[in-house]
Image: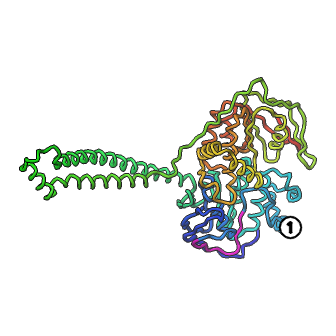
Amino acid sequence: MQEALWRIFFYPYNSVEFSYPSSGYPVLKNINFVSTPGWTGITGENGAGKTTLLLLAAGLLIPGGGSIRGGPDRLYCPQRTDEIPKFWEDLFFAADNAAGRLMDSLGIGVDWPYRWETLSHGERKRFQAAAALWRNPAVLALDEPTNHLDRETAALIRDALETYRGIGLLVSHDRALLDRLCGNCLFLREGTLTSRPGGVSQGLAEEKRELAEQRGVRKKLLDEADRLAVEADRRQRIVASSRNRLSKQGIDFGDWDTRGKINLARLSGKDTVGANQYKRMKDRVERAEQAWEKAVNPYERKRGITLGGQRARGDRLFFLEAGSIPLGKGRSLSFPELLITPEDRIALTGPNGSGKSTLIRHGLPRISAPLLYLPQELGVGESREIMDAVFWEEEKLRGEILARFSRLGSDPRLLFRSVLPSPGEIRKLVIARGIFYDPALIIMDKPTNHLDMVSIGLLETALAEYTGALLLVSHDEAFLSRLTGQQGAIHREGPDSVLGG
């Protein structure tokens, strides 16, 4: 790597706020922390503002309030893989053996810049990371570097990132990566930030402890509110009884003795003590209930969805005769006769670039059954089309889609605050909208990419309960083992790929 010509101290973020022009509601509110050399992890649910924070750190966005101290040598490495990395020429044409070693360590092919469109998204991710690390900026803002990667390649990325000595800000849902690299983690919740020392597992354990304490406080306040409400009701009855005693209704007009005692009680205010006690008790009830509302965890929304679907009639949903598909550069993928029945739950595995997504795209036109398809990556244009489609749905259906979107772990209110929702939010919209078409077959290509940790668990539970046929492409072995019973594995034979059982 290039020798750094800078000296790092620290970069403080003081009361930083940010809102996108299209939304008056702040994405980030009163953000305060200090970035220092080493990796700082950033985590939070989809749409919480993680990418926005990285763009601010890299100087690509200007805060609407507060300040960020940072020099000119800052670089953002994006989550999306639509475009070839900027400054890739710096790496490829460097007259330095270190550049060659970096490319070799990450398996970067010398022809990759010239066939970007044919690279798998996993290969593009490696290219992004290599170009960013070669630049060796003072501040590196890295967004989901292990998305799309198989286990072996993700390990190569982790090893490479460990060599970086600048100030690193790392957004990731890869718990192993955050635990290994980060000495501090930032937890974003609805635009606010909490900093905790250590990796993400340590931070989540601390958060769990804090939430348990919060629930305990809430229960005490709720019990107190209930007790006070019972007491207030008792005192209200006393007050009502006192008012009846002070009433002259039904007393004979000539009973001057009784009427005189009532007049004296009213004048002395003796029986108004109960009314005052009741008012004070009612005020205490209101304060206890307000304290309870503040103690309620604002992030505990109702979560979890049912995918529904239907069991297809007949004995097959998909059939493809044995054949081969070109993969570019003279490479091909060979496959045997392929069949999907209504009971199948299939895992499709293989290394990056072996042709998994190509095989799925080849087979899609041959599927006539009701289908929910989630591609590996959705570009900016496709994402906008999905947003528009949801926006123009009939009002009731749109409300139901957004309700399911919420139960997949994201807040619908955050959807329209940025120029374009995060890739994780878009994927949830595809799932939430696809439910209403009762799919007999669900095909998902890298379904956990871009999703936060909570959302992955919610999706896994929903897929486990789904009664139709399922085809999943993933590098998450635990995810596949819990959801599938059959496997098709693609392996390499020289430059070509072969699908086996």
What's the magenta region? 65-76
Where is 93 relative to 497, above or below? below
Q: Residue at the location (36% across, 50% down)? A: 221
Query: Does the magenta segment cover residue 273?
Result: no
107 relative to 59 in the view: left or right? right
Percent position (x, y) of residue 241? 20, 45
Instruction: Indicate the position of residue 54 as horizontal and vertical percent values.
Output: 65, 63
Farthest residue toward the left?
A: 257
Which residue reaches farthest front? 253
Q: Quadrant of the N terminus?
A: bottom right
Q: Is residue 430 visible?
A: yes
> Nearest the camera: 259 or 483?
259
Residue 98 appears in the picture as rendered: no
The residue at 63%/39% (across/down) is 460
- The colour mode here is rainbow
* Element marked by disc 1: loop
Quarter-of-image position of residue 96: bottom right
Judge whether residue 68 is colored magenta: yes
Task: Indicate whether 349 appears above or below 161.
Answer: above
Q: Residue at x 76, y 68 (%)?
A: 135
Residue at 78% x, 37% y: name it: 489
**What's the residue type where badge 1 is placed?**
Phe
Q: As displayed, is residue 242 above or below residue 321?
A: below
Give the x, y percent position of residue 146.
70, 53
Which residue appears farthest toward the top when viewing the image? Answer: 314
In the rendered image, residue 298, in percent from the top left (x then y), is placed at 50, 52
Q: Which residue is mark 1?
A: 93
